[in-house]
Amino acid sequence: MILLAGGNLGVGTTSPTSTMQTGGSFAAPISAKTGSYTLTASDHTVTFNVTSLTATLPAASGCTGRMYTIINYNASSLTVSTYKDLTNSDATSLA
């Protein structure tokens, strides 16, 4: 691991060109949920495979820049607390 004077952090690389750069793989927790669930700071990838449930996201003001991967394995829609979709519009459903 190397931290350059400009603040760039490299893991597996000695010359990072971004704020954080890895020269290898990245691992994050994956959890499967069978009911409604409120995502936390410990979550990264959360899978759902049931009908009629809600995934609640934390307030964006408390976790600016945090990324979640939410996977809906069921044919029905998954209701999610309001989030911004790819067009920057408010959305509440993952189909």
Image (tube, grey):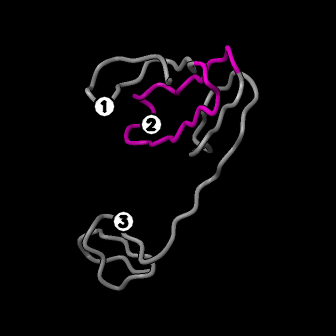
33 w.r.t. 36: above or below: below
Q: Residue at x 42, y 72 (%)?
A: 22
Q: Residue at x 69, y 18 (%)?
A: 51
Quarter of the rendering containing residue 85 = top left
On the image, numbered disc 1 is attached to which residue? 86
Query: As shown in the figure, which amino acid type bears the numbered disc 3?
Result: Met
Q: Secondary structure at mark 3?
A: strand
Depth order, front residue of 54/39: 54
Q: CA distance from mark 2 to mark 3?
A: 18 Å
Q: Are marks 3 and 1 in contact (CB under 8 Å)?
A: no
Query: As shown in the figure, which amino acid type bears the numbered disc 2?
Result: Cys
Depth order, front residue of 80/60: 80
Give the number of callouts: 3
Q: Which residues are magenta?
A: 51-76
Q: Residue at x 50, y 18 (%)?
A: 81
Binning the other alpha carbons within 10 Å of mark 1 as few (below 14), some (14 to 19) or many (20 upward) gives: few
On the image, numbered disc 2 is attached to which residue? 63
Q: Secondary structure at mark 2?
A: loop
From the viewer's perspective, is 19 left or right of 30?
A: left
Binning the other alpha carbons within 10 Å of mark 2 as few (below 14), some (14 to 19) or many (20 upward) gives: few
9 w.r.t. 1: above or below: above
Q: Secondary structure at mark 1?
A: loop
First in sequence: mark 2 vs mark 1? 2
Q: Are marks 2 and 3 in contact (CB under 8 Å)?
A: no
Query: As shown in the figure, which amino acid type bears the numbered disc 1?
Result: Leu
Name, please, the residue furthest toward the front.
Answer: 75
Binning the other alpha carbons within 10 Å of mark 3 as few (below 14), some (14 to 19) or many (20 upward) gives: few
Q: Nearer the viewer, mark 3 or mark 1?
A: 1
Look at the image and say whether residue 60 sits in the magenta stretch.
yes
